[in-house]
Amino acid sequence: MTQREPGRERPARPRSPYLNPAMAAAWLGISPRALQAHRSKGTGPRFRRHFRNIRYHIDDLDAWSRATARASGRRKAGTP
């Protein structure tokens, strides 16, 4: 049996569509702290809580990313 570093979560099972918060943040290209802030505010992607573990489904991450994407080249009104 191999020992893991303390505090490290186990990686997702092969072919599992569920990611832990660190993996989900990497998938989205944001920091784990930013993902946590979105989760706390209720503005982030849908997640599931399995006892103490938080998991994100890849489809939910992709849907949230598409929904929050801004069209390139568009600016807010009143900005040069």
Image (tube, rainbow, N blue to C red):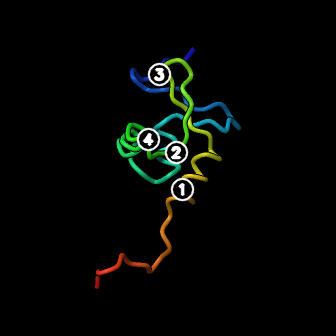
Q: Which mark sits nearer the N-terminus, 3 or 2?
A: 3
Per the image, label 1 sits on a secondary structure element best described as helix
Residue under label 1, please give it.
Answer: 65
Rendered view: 55 above or below 35 = above
Give the distance between the C-alpha atoms of the residues marked 3 and 2, in whole angstroms: 29 Å
Looking at the figure, which quarter contains the N terminus? Answer: top right
Check residue 29 in the rendering and tell me which mark sits there, or answer none.
Answer: none
Q: CA distance from mark 4 to mark 2?
A: 8 Å
Q: Which circle marks residue 4 in the picture?
A: 3
Disc 4 or 1, which lies upstream in sequence?
4
Q: Which quadrant, please, contains the C terminus? A: bottom left
Q: Which residue lies at the image location 55% right of the left edge and 40% below the top edge?
A: 46
Q: Residue at x 54, y 36 (%)?
A: 47
Mark 4: amino acid: Gly
Q: Amino acid at mark 3?
A: Arg
Task: Check disc 3 and report its element: helix, strand or loop.
Answer: loop
Cα distance between the residues tagged 1 and 2? 8 Å
Residue 70 at what x, y percent from top left? 48, 68
In 3D space, how far apart are the residues under numbered discs 4 and 3 (Cα atoms)?
A: 32 Å
Q: Which residue is mark 2?
A: 45
Dot 4 corresponds to which residue?
Answer: 42
- Looking at marks 3 and 1 on the same chain, the residue that comes earlier in the sequence is marked by 3
In the depicted structure, whether residue 34 falls above or below residue 51: below
**Spatial CA span between label 3 and label 1:** 32 Å
